[in-house]
Image (cartoon, rainbow, N blue to C red):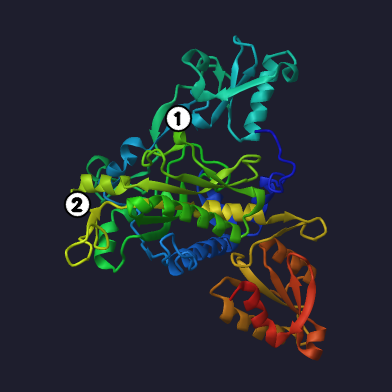
C-alpha cells in the first residue's frame, strides 16, 4: 500500500490536489459544510452537477434510447431496453425477500478508547516478523496516514531496525482473540481496545407516517436500485410490448450506512447508481453476459478511461455473490484511482444473477413472475411452437454514477507547469461540463456587441448538452486559465481582427493551438467537435 506505480500517470497525481480543484472550481463540496459537514455525504456544485448530468445522460442515451448504440446482441437482433424510475422506499418485505434484512451486513470492529468504528475487512495489522510477543498495530487499508502512524508506533515500541527485521502485515480478521488483546487500534494509544468483529446492517431505517413507530411502521431507504426493477418485472411485461430478451434500466439514489466512508466520493453513504437488469432465457445467459461485459468496458473507454488505468477483472469462484452460481460470469470494471494505486477500485460490476431475485420475490410475494415465451417449446401439429414457461435469468451491469464522475475527474486532471493555471482538466468533449466559452478580448471597441450574439447562438444550439460560458472580466489569460481548470475544450475569442474580417480565434484546450475561423462557422465547428 505504500508502493508507487511510477510508470502510471494516475498514481503520481495527488488526491489532495484533485479535491482542492474540485472545491475551488465548484465540482464537489462537502455537504453541510457551513455546519462542519457530515461524513459520507457530498454536494455537487455547478460544474460537478453538470458533469454528473452529462455522464448520466450519456449512459441513458447510449443504453436506453439507442439500445447499446445500435450494437446487435448475440442473437443478431437490436438490443431492447426500457426505462424505469422506482421508489426509494419500498415495502420492507422487498428487502426481506432480497436478503438485505438478514444478510446485508459488514463485519465491524469498535475501539473502546476512541469510540471509532471500522470495517473489520478494511483493517490491516503490522508487527515485526518473528516477534510473536510484541504488540500489533492496526491501520486502515489504503490510507497512507494511518499506515505511517502505525509504522511510527511500531518503530518506537521495537527498538530494533525495522527495515532490517521486516514488517509482517496481515488482515485483522485473521487475528485470534489473544492477538486482538495486544492490538493497538488505528487511532488508539492503548492495547486491547479493539473488539472482535460483529455484524452490522448497512441499511438506513426510517419510519412511515407522522405518528408511526419503528416497530410497526419501519421502512428502509433502498440500498440498491436493482430490486425496484425486479419487483416491477411483471408490470413491465404486462403493460408494454417487450419480450425476452430485454432489459430494464434506471438511474437513482441508493443509501448505505457505511461505517467508514472514505476516499472522497468513492465510498459514500448516499450515492447514485446506473443499473440494467437484462432478462434472458437461461440457455442464453452466458452469451448475454459476455456481450454486456465487453460492451460496458468499451463504453467507459470511449469516454476517456483507457490505457492501464482501466481493467476488466473476472471474479474467482470464491468471490461470487450469494445470487450467483459457480460458473456464472461475474466481472468488475476497475479504475486505478490515486488512493488505490497501484491497485484498482470497482467502477462497475457485470454479473449473471441467474434467476435468484425473481425466484425470491415470487416465493415471498406469492406472485407468479415466470415468463411465457411463445417462440419456444415443442412444435404443435400446425408446426408452431407450443411455448415455454420459465423464470428468466438476469445479467446485471451495475455502475456507480458518483464513482464514474470521480474516475473522470481523476483521469482528466492533468498537471502542466507551462500553463498559468498549472493544470487543466482533459475531459472528453461529450462529458465536459462547459462545452465552449465566448470571450470578447476587451470590454470595449464593439467587441462585446459581437460576442454576445455569438454566445446566444451557441447557447440556444448547444445548451442542452452543457454550459456555454460568457465572460468579460479580467485578462484573457486568466479567463483561459479558469476554463482550463473547468475542462472547457474550446474558447472563442473576439478581438480586433474580428472587427476587420469577421473571424474569431479558437483556442484548443489540450494542445493550446489557436486558429481563426469565420464567426458564422463557429456553430458548425463546435457541432462537429462535439459529435452533433
Q: Nearer the viewer, residue 430 or 405?
A: 430
Spatial distance from mark 2 to mark 1, Cα to Cα?
37 Å
Task: Give the answer, above or below, for where 330 lies relative to 142.
Answer: below
Q: Residue furthest top?
A: 133
Q: Which residue is mark 1?
A: 108
Residue 98: horizontal and vertical position, in percent? Answer: 31, 44
Q: Residue furthest bottom?
A: 500
State yes or no: discs 2 and 1 in contact (Cβ < 8 Å).
no
The image quarter containing residue 238 is bottom left
Task: Give the answer, above or below, for where 531 lies relative to 345.
Answer: below
Q: Nearer the viewer, residue 245 or 193?
A: 245
Residue 19: horizontal and vertical position, in percent? Answer: 64, 50
Q: Residues within 10 Å of mark 1 (few under 14, many from 20)?
A: many
Residue at 31% across / 36% down in the picture?
102
Task: Give the answer, above or below, for where 450 lies relative to 294.
Answer: below
Residue at 60% across / 52% down in the picture?
407
**Disc 2 vs disc 1: which is toward the camera?**
2
Q: Nearer the viewer, residue 376 or 93?
A: 376
| Viewport quadrant of the N terminus | top right
| Viewport quadrant of the C terminus | bottom right
Between discs 2 and 1, the one toward the N terminus? 1
Judge left or right: residue 312 versus residue 376: right
Residue at 71% across / 46% down in the picture?
8
- Looking at the rendered structure, the secondary structure element under dot 2 is loop
Total marks placed:
2
Q: Which residue is mark 2?
A: 367
Residue 209: horizontal and vertical position, in percent? Answer: 25, 51
Q: Residues within 10 Å of mark 2 (few under 14, many from 20)?
A: few
Judge left or right: residue 286 versus residue 438: left
The image quarter containing residue 65 is bottom left
Q: Is residue 241 visible?
A: yes
- Looking at the rendered structure, the secondary structure element under dot 1 is strand
Amino acid at each position: 500500500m505504500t508502493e508507487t506505480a511510477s510508470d502510471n500517470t494516475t498514481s503520481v497525481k495527488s488526491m489532495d490536489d484533485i479535491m482542492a480543484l474540485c472545491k475551488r472550481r465548484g465540482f464537489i463540496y462537502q455537504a453541510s459544510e457551513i455546519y462542519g459537514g457530515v461524513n459520507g455525504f457530498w454536494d455537487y456544485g455547478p460544474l460537478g452537477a453538470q458533469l454528473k448530468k452529462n455522464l448520466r445522460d450519456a449512459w441513458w442515451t447510449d443504453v436506453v434510447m439507442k439500445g447499446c448504440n445500435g450494437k446487435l446482441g448475440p442473437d443478431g437482433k437490436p438490443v431492447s431496453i426500457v426505462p424505469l424510475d422506482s421508489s426509494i422506499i419500498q415495502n420492507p418485505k422487498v428487502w426481506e425477500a432480497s436478503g438485505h434484512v438478514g444478510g446485508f451486513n459488514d463485519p465491524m470492529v469498535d475501539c473502546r478508547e476512541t469510540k471509532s468504528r471500522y470495517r473489520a475487512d478494511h483493517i490491516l495489522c503490522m508487527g515485526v516478523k518473528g516477534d510473536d510477543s510484541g504488540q500489533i498495530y492496526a491501520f486502515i487499508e489504503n490510507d497512507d496516514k494511518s499506515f505511517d502512524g502505525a509504522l511510527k508506533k511500531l518503530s518506537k515500541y521495537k527498538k530494533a531496525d525495522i527495515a532490517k527485521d521486516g514488517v509482517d502485515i496481515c488482515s485483522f480478521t485473521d487475528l485470534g482473540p489473544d492477538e486482538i488483546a495486544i492490538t493497538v487500534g488505528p487511532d488508539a494509544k492503548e492495547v486491547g481496545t479493539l473488539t472482535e468483529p460483529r455484524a452490522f446492517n448497512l441499511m438506513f431505517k426510517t419510519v412511515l407516517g407522522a405518528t408511526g413507530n419503528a416497530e410497526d411502521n419501519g421502512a428502509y431507504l433502498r440500498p440498491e436500485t436493482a430490486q425496484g426493477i425486479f419487483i416491477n418485472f411483471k408490470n413491465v411485461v404486462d403493460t408494454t410490448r417487450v419480450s425476452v430478451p430485454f432489459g430494464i434500466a434506471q438511474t437513482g439514489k441508493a443509501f448505505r450506512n457505511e461505517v467508514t466512508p472514505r476516499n472522497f466520493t468513492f465510498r459514500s453513504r448516499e450515492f447514485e447508481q446506473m443499473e440494467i437488469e437484462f432478462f434472458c432465457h437461461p440457455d442464453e445467459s452466458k452469451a448475454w453476459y459476455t456481450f454486456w461485459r465487453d460492451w460496458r468496458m468499451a463504453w467507459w473507454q470511449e469516454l476517456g478511461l483507457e490505457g492501464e488505468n482501466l481493467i476488466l477483472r473476472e471474479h474467482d469462484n470464491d468471490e461470487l455473490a450469494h445470487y450467483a452460481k459457480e460458473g456464472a460470469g461475474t466481472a468488475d470494471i476497475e479504475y486505478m484511482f490515486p488512493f488505490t494505486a497501484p491497485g484498482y477500485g470497482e467502477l462497475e460490476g457485470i454479473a449473471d444473477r441467474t434467476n435468484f431475485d425473481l425466484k425470491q420475490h415470487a416465493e415471498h410475494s406469492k406472485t407468479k413472475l415466470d415468463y411465457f415465451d411463445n417462440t419456444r417449446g415443442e412444435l404443435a401439429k400446425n408446426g408452431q411452437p407450443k411455448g415455454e414457461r420459465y423464470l428468466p435469468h438476469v445479467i446485471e451491469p451495475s455502475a456507480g454514477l458518483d464513482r464514474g464522475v470521480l474516475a473522470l475527474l481523476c483521469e482528466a486532471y492533468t498537471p502542466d507547469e507551462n500553463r498559468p493555471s498549472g493544470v487543466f482538466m482533459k475531459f472528453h468533449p461529450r462529458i465536459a461540463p462547459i462545452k465552449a466559452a465566448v470571450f470578447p478580448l476587451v470590454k470595449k471597441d464593439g467587441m462585446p456587441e459581437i460576442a454576445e450574439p455569438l454566445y446566444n447562438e451557441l447557447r440556444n444550439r448547444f445548451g442542452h448538452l452543457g454550459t456555454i460560458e460568457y465572460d468579460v472580466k479580467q485578462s484573457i489569460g486568466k479567463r483561459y486559465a479558469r476554463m482550463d481548470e473547468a475542462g472547457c475544450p474550446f474558447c472563442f475569442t473576439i478581438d480586433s481582427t474580428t472587427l476587420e474580417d469577421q473571424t474569431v480565434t479558437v483556442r484548443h484546450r489540450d494542445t493550446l493551438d489557436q486558429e481563426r475561423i469565420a464567426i458564422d462557422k463557429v456553430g458548425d465547428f463546435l457541432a462537429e467537435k462535439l459529435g452533433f
